[in-house]
Amino acid sequence: MRPSETEPDFIELDRVSKRFPGSQQPGLKPTTLTIENGKFITVLGSSGSGKTTLLKLINRLHEPSSGEIRIQGRNIATTSAIELRRHIGYVIQQVGLFPHMTVEQNIAIVPEILGWTKRQIVQRVDELLTLVELSPHEFRKRYPGQLSGGQQQRVGLARALAGDPSILLMDEPFGAIDTLTRSKLQMELLEIQRKLKKTIIFVTHDISEALKLGDQVIVMHNGQVQQYDTPAKLLSEPANEFVRTFLDADAPYQQLEYMPIRHLITYRAEEVERNVPRIQENQSMKDALALMLDSPYNYVAVEDHRRRFLGIITLESLKAARRKWPTVGVS
Amino acid sequence: MFSYALHHHQELLRALIEHIELSVTALFIAFSIALPLGYSLSKSPRLSNTVVGLFSMLYAIPSLGLLALLVPVFGLGNVSAIIALVLYAQFILVRNTILGFRSVSPTMVEVGKGMGLSAFQLFRQVEFPLALPTIIGGLRVATASTIGIASLAAWINAGGLGAILFDGIYQNHIPKMLWGSLLITALGLSLELMLLDLQKSAQSEIHTTT
């Protein structure tokens, strides 16, 4: 399953459709698309849009009614489904940690069936727990029932990464997690993806989540792909009326949420006054604007994640960005 | 009463061992059938209703009647008795096995499949441990009922503590009656407690999620 020199580096859906027995509406209408390796793809749609169907076709929890799916050039229908799944990480909303196994045992399942040695597995568990920011010492012997929702999903992610898959499928993984923990997990997931260069296909019904995380977003409705594009393009050039209304692409305030501020920072060495509101460099223009609206200042101070002062963002720069929209911002 | 036990302790011991042998053999066979049967039935609700319905009808046949029916075919003795006990135990065992596997959340099964577990690995690592407390619960009830019904096996010359008890009733021999029923009760209770313990430890293995 690892990409080699000669094989194409992507997942291809070739006229893939799925019809469920006893259902009038097809789960997925014939779909052709390509997902490049190492990309973070979000699949956005309401329930019944076919987004989960699309996901489950890739690890063969569903079999297509027609068409074929190729991973690294190989038709997955010709490989063993079980073998295929061992090389694709899978994370779901309900997490699904096995309650009778410790955190360590949960993570070790795939490495064990892949035949890794005890030593490799112990090392891998440590490595993964550290990656998802849980102290191995404290957490490896715990049971899922002794973890918070956010911690469970961290372990779920670690488990999915255990066999070092090149592809990670995530089905609304943060759907049941409170807003605060959720945005923290989102940031960490982006960090992890940057570090590990996995291909991530991430299903969500949360518009801001899809636009924030995805290098590219697949917008789905009624079993059909409506648009497959970068977040900026989705907002500036919605392919049809559905995408336009669904994303609320006309609302400037809404759009600001998906515009990172890092391009607008005026870097400077000397600190600003203590009362100036602070913002982190990975936050959005919407956050910056909200802070300005509530303070007497027309600028905010930007800090990095270690709370070191970087520079400021002014109201003027926000307005300028808005005028140049959508060329500024989302990368 | 104690003098009877003192003089006849060998006879009592033999009857007790016979009773245990009979019950344990029957339970072992019954469980070996019920586990795979219950597991496969748990996957098809409609068929499972039919089969459990059939077993419940069988369960409703009076024990002596069933024994009497089996004797012409399998003769007097152990074989008929064991067959009867196995048949009775099926209802409780199969029903609880089905319930046990159905109680395993579909999420667990899907996640297990999604990570590439084979059908056997899924069974051994996920489904079976999660269904185990309910399955042992069934085994516990089936054990109690098997030990009770095994007393009747004495009627078809299969021995056991029932033989002592019925002798006592025939001969109006109070110590025999008492020792017979006492030992049956003690046997039933001790196995019950053992299995209850097992069920609890299987349950605590699961560490129910908050």
Image (spheres, coloured by chain):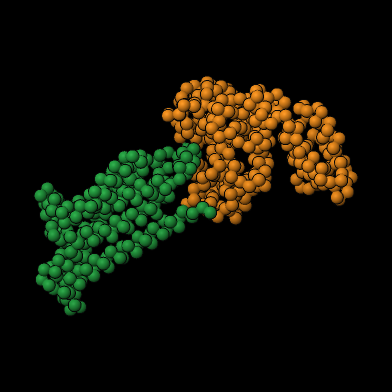
Chain colours: A orange, B green
In the rendered view, does B100 fall on the left or right side of B115? left
The answer to whether any part of residue A11 appears in the image is: no
In the rendered view, does A269 fall on the left or right side of A51? right
Pick the residue in front: B123 or A259.
A259
Relative vertical location of residue A148 with respect to residue A314 in this rendering, above or below: below
Residue B54, image x and y in percent? Answer: 25, 45
In the rendered view, does B131 fall on the left or right side of A238? left
Residue B145, image x and y in percent? Answer: 26, 58
Q: What quarter of the picture does the N terminus of chain B occupy?
A: bottom left
Q: Residue at x 59, y 32 (%)?
A: A45
Residue A2, image x and y in percent? Answer: 56, 30
Residue B159, image x and y in percent? Answer: 16, 61
Relative vertical location of residue A122 with respect to residue A2 in this rendering, above or below: below
Pick the residue in front: B47 or B101.
B47
Q: Residue at x 52, y 31 (%)?
A: A53
Relative vertical location of residue A248 with respect to residue A298 in this rendering, above or below: above
Pick the residue in front: A304 or A300.
A300
The answer to whether any part of residue B130 appears in the image is: yes
Q: Residue at x 40, y 46 (%)?
A: B102
How many numbered discs sit on the rendered protein?
0
Q: Residue at x 67, y 43 (%)?
A: A183
